[in-house]
Amino acid sequence: MTTDCENCSLRRKDLFAQMSADEVRYMQRFKAGELVIDAGKTLLMEGSNSPQLFTALRGMGLRYKTLEGGQRQVINFIFPGDFIGMQAGLMGEMGHSVEATTQMTLCVFDRAEFWTFFRDHPERAFALTWLAAVEEHLLGDALATVGQRTALAAVAWALVRFHMRATALDMVQDGAIPMPYSQQDLADALGFSLVHTNKTLGKLRDRQMISWHDGTLQLHDLKGLARIAGVELSPPLERPLM
Amino acid sequence: MTTDCENCSLRRKDLFAQMSADEVRYMQRFKAGELVIDAGKTLLMEGSNSPQLFTALRGMGLRYKTLEGGQRQVINFIFPGDFIGMQAGLMGEMGHSVEATTQMTLCVFDRAEFWTFFRDHPERAFALTWLAAVEEHLLGDALATVGQRTALAAVAWALVRFHMRATALDMVQDGAIPMPYSQQDLADALGFSLVHTNKTLGKLRDRQMISWHDGTLQLHDLKGLARIAGVELSPPLERPLM
DNA sequence: CGGTTGTTTGACGCCCTTCAACGAGCGTGG
DNA sequence: CCACGCTCGTTGAAGGGCGTCAAACAACCG
């Protein structure tokens, strides 16, 4: 019993670009099924060549790379609506691993059908490229904060970004955001040690700008955080949904 | 007097994926002209919405973002064959600035024609998406080094990567690579200060692994550098040429 | 010749890493 | 029931990698 693209609640979020009825019908045909994966399991491995592509329907995960020294760099956090596996679909090899942080249910597409996108449905192919461009943009931002911002600014940046994305997906209730990730995950995303990340979060907590416990995050002073991060509080980029 | 795509020497490099004669003809029609830009000049500004797209034919440049504090993060170094302006072409706004480091000559495409790619030439549209996926892959690598590697490993990584790309483009003569960038550029790419980057380069020089002067870079111990960087010495990813 | 840009080196200090320890929550098995 | 192990968050102390400040040198140019 899978969700029809027609009735998919994700499609109605403001974050995602409108799709024509024709496009929706086409995606429905393209959809091979749904996959439920448990928390902590890995969906794709770096270097693998998966025959399937996914878009996250429910749940959250993360993309990461592992270096030779054993260090882990978290590339980004995966929210519902994110498309997963494009690198394998296009280049034949994933550049990072993907793992589920909570239980996730994913829309499954067959990679073999991927090519027909470009031949038969140019709007969808355009959307795919658009998506890749958005990811590149976001990765550029992440690179800039990891490279240039101090720990305090970097943590504030990550939390603000997280909040904006969650807000765009209507995941915020009474100012409380589901936050399934560990401080280690955040540390690995920002390139800081766990200890220092923890102490930096402590500073923001002492200033009563955030509270984060029991898998729930609250930002009590969004403007203050944005000032510390050095970013504008603009809504996230509109993006296509696959 | 512009270069015909037919005779473009870039197309013959191993780095770039083969194109059918049909594709070459189509790209030729798509090409609006050539642009020569002087060293130090800005080609695209962050936030701008350029009506034109480019691929670098000759010369080198760099992509960068500027933060509110005035810091600069270099996103990557631009080599001949790189496609420039995709973000503006797809999302309507550049996420970073682009500037010429040496004099550059660029192939100019009209953005308005961009859409016809997807409608009339699905192979080219596919190549474009492929290109975006490659960039995402490379950015992920960069993020991992900036986030996780020490200064010595990061500098070695950057030099090895630079060497491999230059080699794939036949820019190496007697082990000497043209290196038009300043140490400040490298520092801003890796997220280290100029002083510390300089001292790190000094260490590699003292070990007689590199020499870099007068705009020329030589790597005397590629394997040693790769070991310090913690990377495999694999050839760069094949990529499409626009 | 002065002004500018880029490289190099030394001194000093701090942000961040590492090491270490402790507590809370939570399953598992005695 | 409680002991036990495991994960995760928290805090303190010590040390080092890296940033900042400063100055000098070389190359280039008007």
Image (cartoon, coloured by chain):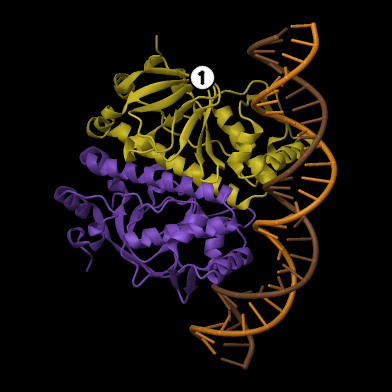
Chain colours: A yellow, B purple, C brown, D orange
Q: Quadrant of residue A1?
A: top left
Relative image position of residue B14 (x, y in whole percent): 26, 56
The type of residue carrying mark 1 is Asp
Residue A188 located left or right of residue B76? right
* Residue at image location 34% in from the left, 56% down from the top: B54
Q: Residue at the spot x=58%, y=23% of the render?
A: A171
Would you identify the image quadrant in which residue B115 lies? top left
Q: From where the camera sits, is residue B234 visible?
A: yes
Q: Quadrant of residue B81?
A: bottom left
**Chain under disc 1:** A
Please tell me which residue lies in front, B71 or B43. Answer: B71
**Residue furthest left as drawn:** B21
Q: Is residue A70 above or below residue B69?
A: above
Q: Residue at x 40, y 21 (%)?
A: A107
Q: Quadrant of the N terminus of chain B?
A: bottom left
Q: Which residue is mark 1?
A: A38
Residue B73 visible in the displayed image: no
Callout 1 crowding tier (Cα within 10 Å): few <14, some 14–19, many ≥20: some
Q: Nearest the camera: A218 or B228? A: B228
How far across and down, in percent of the image, does residue B191 sit? 58, 55
Q: Secondary structure at mark 1?
A: loop
**Location of residue A71 in the rendering, given as x and y in whole percent from the top left corner:** 57, 43
Measured along the vertical axis of the image, is residue B63 above or below residue B206? above
